Amino acid sequence: MKKWLTSLSFATAMFVATSSASAEGVTGDIRSEHDIAAFIAKHPIAKSQLQTYVTAPTSATVGKTENTAALNSVNLVRYLTDLPQVKEHKNFSDLAQNAAFLMNKNNQLAHQIPVPPGMSSTNKIYKKGAIAGLASNIGAGYPNIQQSILNGYIVDNGSNKSAIGHRKWLLNPTMRSIGFGKVGNYTDTYVFDNKASVNQQLPGYYKWSTKDLQEPGGWGLAEKNNANTKIAWPAQRMPLQLMTADTPFSLAVGKNYTISDRVKITMKNSKKSVTIDSKNLKSGQHYSVSPSGYGYMNAIVWHANPNDFTFKDGDTYTIKITGLLKNKKATTINYKVRFFDLEDSFVKPSYPKTITLKKGKSYTFKNLQRFDFDNRANIDIRVSNSKSLKKMNNVTFKSLKKGTAYVTVTNKIHKQTKKIKVVTK
């Protein structure tokens, strides 16, 4: 996410005597592995599937994406960190779709989107997309929006790890509404939740409710409601499927916390303990401070040498952070991160022996949708006769004519292969 406010200054730096520090944990409840699996089962993320559209874009029209899985993905990472769930706002999604359309026209990933050849800067598509580009997480090369969220923005590794701006916008505790768009190679997730501002910049373009325009937001709301909030990523109960070897750790803190000029983070598992000292980084370690211009909260960001730790199922890491002040008094943050494999958290599904459908109707294996949480296809179906049945995606098929045929279901997680009779009447 391009840094959009550059005039922010950090609080006055100071050393902290940690010997007199109080101790505290991370804000929010810790989700159980069972509850996380149940959340995904109820809110499928369809990670392996190609992007679907309500209206496909063309060279002249922006189109409209189907955003259920994208919204589920954002709400999954917020659920893991015990943050309020957000809703899709149709106006934000329209803005995001216009931005993605422009980036595709230009074949260029950009927050400050140039006017495409043959288009005027007064064109409504351009005016919408230009505003959205400055208020969004943007990505390229993802097959769907949910992968840009779960493989890109929330990971925020590589050149993004110093600021982790994309991550902080997704985990902004004040966010209530969000929007999504994708055209061609380009994705846009509208994250600023600034309804009144958009109405001022684009008067008459959208219909907004009175409640929309009266919503408080930004720093004021964060300072009022989240002054003592502490948001950790990876989450305290963390699916391995959302973790990579080079995912930076982060802790975002509310306005009552000051980050001193010397912070020490100790990471310890059952085999090893490593300290990241902001004033004495060792080879392969990373430390940075991300300002509140991203997501309305300051944050510390760190990474041990990748050779120090390999994140595995069942590993628990104890995190201790010193060098922070709360209301000008030294404090120590202690919490634990436990990694687990989602594949072990889902109950083996059962299947019907026979499925009866009317001609032209579709059938979805809803109990299998929950397994599509990885890039690879953990589940798939195969039809015996393409003239009788049509495969719609990896969990859905459609009957084409009366008669009997078969569908074979493959569930790689539980090593299941089931052949099911389908009767069309």
Image: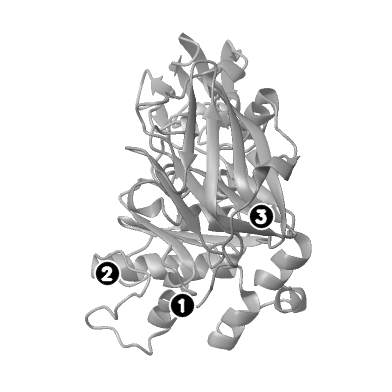
Q: Amino acid at mark 3?
A: Val
- Callout 2 secondary element: helix
Which residue was labeled with disc 3?
86
Instruction: Work out which quarter of the rendered image holds the C terminus and state it.
Output: top right
Which label number is shown at residue 131?
1
Q: Is residue 394 visible?
A: yes
Q: Residue at x 54, y 42 (%)?
A: 264
- The mark found on residue 105 in the picture is 2
**Closer to the observer: label 2 or label 3?**
3
Locate residue 309: give its quadrant: top left
Please, what is the three-letter code of the amino acid marked with disc 2? Lys
Residue 69 pos. (x, y %): 53, 45
Give the SS element for disc 3: loop
User: Residue 222, relative to residue 363: is it above or below?
Assistant: below
In the shown orientation, is residue 250 left or right of residue 282?
Answer: right
Measured in 3D between alpha carbons, the distance from the residue under mark 2 to the one under mark 3, in whole angstroms, is 30 Å
Amino acid type for the residue under numbered disc 1: Ile
Residue 33, percent across and down? 65, 24
257 and 330: which is toward the camera: 330
Q: Nearer the viewer, residue 326 or 83?
A: 326
